[in-house]
Image: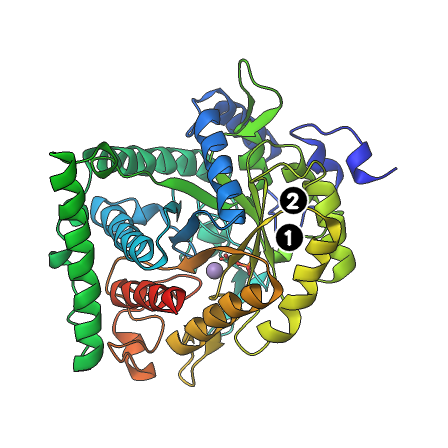
């Protein structure tokens, strides 16, 4: 029997192979925690999920553009007002730059309020001769290097649900109140562009955004409603299937099941096996679903994913996030675009220029070069244009803070600078300046 023909239930994934999960020492506590979460109110609503799906359908057609970004691994300690506000601010600023440059609306999706579970390439970590289980994200275990902290604890899923709720509560309040940044682009920090010519170009773009906002307000005689509210959707990797299952609900007057822990769950590259548990879980929910597509993806595998996750070709349902690496994308992406074209189905193509461009410096820091990230992105725009497909959005690992994790950009961050303020527990993020500059350069590319 094919996978699509078997009955789906929120827990049918348990009959499949679930990779990247943990074994809890105490099954009874796990079941109690899951029952507790299942009784708590949802974090998002089905109408928000449907409204994002409709926007993703437009992104697939090139009518709007998706900006998705946030931490690689959100931590419970990141649930602080400054960290949340600065991430939303940078996403907002980037989105305005993109709206201005691309002349189309931008839908903002934060990797936030639930990005707490991480796939790992090794089950163990060794330091100074001691070997412990790997850190798998705050939803599974703790980061400290002691055996107690690395034991998987199901109570962390309850803590994760609560932190996600607190994060979302503040995101919604900030969004409702609007942001001063929206009305005062002149306050954005552009001083990083030390090269005078580049600095002037960036200043000109920001001044032009400012004029556009003023113009709209003068014409309307007041601030437009769309300028008083800022919408953000949320997304996270649907890795911890117990956590996702406990928040999978039926909704009155709607068909089917929704994952109400986030608007846009995605399946990571390492858990995208078409016969595996993560694909099984995601096939049954009504949310739009993302799938990361790396250089190892084959035509047959992608065809299976299209059959299982996108049987009805529902607009906005499937988001394929390619992450190939700057040196491989030109070779490996076009055949996959052809596979989807041959299927006759429409997907929302998104470029994640981060995950194929990770490297380790001589002094042991995981990093990414700004130029490689930009190169993959530029190639993606060109490849889609040449093949007549649509690049519907971008997916970044970023933070609004001044961390030193990725190298390069107009600020000139060098490998020697990485130790100054490297905070990410897993992958390196673009900092505030690098993120804003990336948006400015995408906007420049889009105008060419
Ligand atoms: C991620 O987005 O943090 C991640 C692990 O990505 P991928 O599945 O593409 O490797
Ligand atoms: Mn990552």
- Give whichever of discs 1 and 2 has the lower sequence position: 1
What secondary structure is marked by label 2? helix
- The N terminus, quarter of image: top right
Q: Can residue 17 be seen in the rendering of this structure?
A: no
Spatial CA distance of label 1 from label 2 is 6 Å
Residue 36 relative to residue 433: left or right? right
In screen coordinates, is 117 left or right of 268?
left
Residue lying at the far top in this picture: please name it: 253
> At which x and y percent is residue 40?
44, 22
Task: Please identify the quarter of the rendering in which residue 415 is found.
Answer: bottom left
Residue drawn at x 29%, y 38% is: 171
Q: Position of residue 230 (x, y in %)?
A: 27, 39
Query: Quadrant of the rendered structure where residue 414 is?
Result: bottom left
Q: Residue at 29% of width from left, 55% of height from top?
A: 100
Judge: label 2 CB < 8 Å from ligand 1: no
Q: Residue at x 40, y 78 (%)?
A: 371
Residue behind mark 1 = 271
Residue closer to the observer: 5 or 311:
311
Q: Quadrant of residue 16?
A: top right
Q: Are marks 1 and 2 in contact (CB under 8 Å)?
A: yes
User: Relative to 3, does residue 214 appear above or below in the rendering?
Assistant: below
What is the secondary structure assignment of the residue under circle 1?
helix
Mark 2 is surrounded, within 10 Å at the Cα level, by few (under 14), some (14 to 19) or many (20 or more) other residues, namely: many
Residue position marked by numbered label 2 in the rendering: 278
């Amino acid at each position: 029997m094919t996978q699509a023909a078997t009955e789906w239930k929120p827990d049918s994934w348990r009959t499949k192979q679930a990779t990247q999960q943990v074994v809890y020492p105490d099954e009874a506590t796990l079941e109690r925690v899951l029952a507790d979460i299942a009784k708590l109110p949802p974090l998002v609503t089905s109408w928000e999920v449907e409204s994002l799906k409709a926007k993703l359908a437009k992104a697939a057609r090139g009518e709007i553009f998706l900006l998705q970004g946030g931490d690689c691994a959100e931590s419970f300690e990141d649930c602080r007002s400054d960290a949340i506000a600065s991430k939303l601010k940078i996403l907002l600023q980037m989105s305005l730059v993109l709206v201005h440059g691309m002349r189309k609306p931008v839908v903002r999706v934060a990797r936030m309020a639930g990005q707490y579970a991480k796939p790992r390439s090794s089950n163990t970590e060794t330091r100074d001769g001691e070997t412990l289980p790997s850190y798998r994200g705050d939803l599974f275990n703790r980061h400290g290097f002691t055996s107690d902290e690395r034991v998987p604890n199901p109570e962390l899923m309850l803590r994760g649900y609560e932190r996600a709720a607190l994060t979302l509560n503040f995101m919604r309040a900030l969004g409702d109140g609007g942001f001063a940044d929206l009305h005062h682009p002149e306050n954005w920090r552009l001083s990083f562009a030390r090269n005078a010519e580049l600095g002037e170009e960036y200043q000109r773009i920001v001044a032009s955004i400012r004029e556009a906002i003023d113009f709209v307000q003068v014409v309307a005689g007041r601030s437009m409603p769309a300028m008083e509210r800022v919408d953000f959707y949320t997304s996270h990797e649907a890795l911890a299937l117990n956590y996702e299952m406990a928040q999978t609900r039926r909704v009155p007057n709607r068909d089917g099941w929704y994952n109400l822990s986030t608007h846009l769950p995605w399946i990571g590259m390492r858990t995208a096996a078409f016969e595996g548990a993560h694909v099984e879980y995601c096939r049954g929910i009504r949310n739009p679903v993302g799938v990361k597509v790396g250089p190892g993806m084959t035509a047959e595998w992608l065809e299976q994913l299209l059959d299982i996750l996108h049987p009805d070709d529902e607009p906005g349902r499937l988001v394929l996030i390619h992450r190939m690496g700057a040196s491989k994308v030109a070779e490996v992406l076009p055949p996959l675009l052809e596979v989807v074209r041959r299927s006759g189905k429409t997907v929302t193509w998104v470029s994640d220029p981060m995950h194929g461009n990770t490297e380790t410096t001589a002094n042991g820091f995981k990093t990414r070069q700004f130029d490689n990230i930009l190169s993959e992105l530029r190639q993606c725009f060109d490849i889609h244009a040449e093949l007549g497909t649509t690049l519907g959005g971008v997916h970044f690992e970023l933070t609004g803070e001044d961390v030193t994790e990725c190298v390069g950009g107009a600020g000139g961050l060098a490998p020697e600078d990485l130790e100054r303020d490297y905070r990410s527990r897993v992958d390196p993020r673009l900092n505030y300046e690098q993120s804003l500059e990336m948006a400015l350069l995408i906007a420049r590319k889009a105008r060419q």
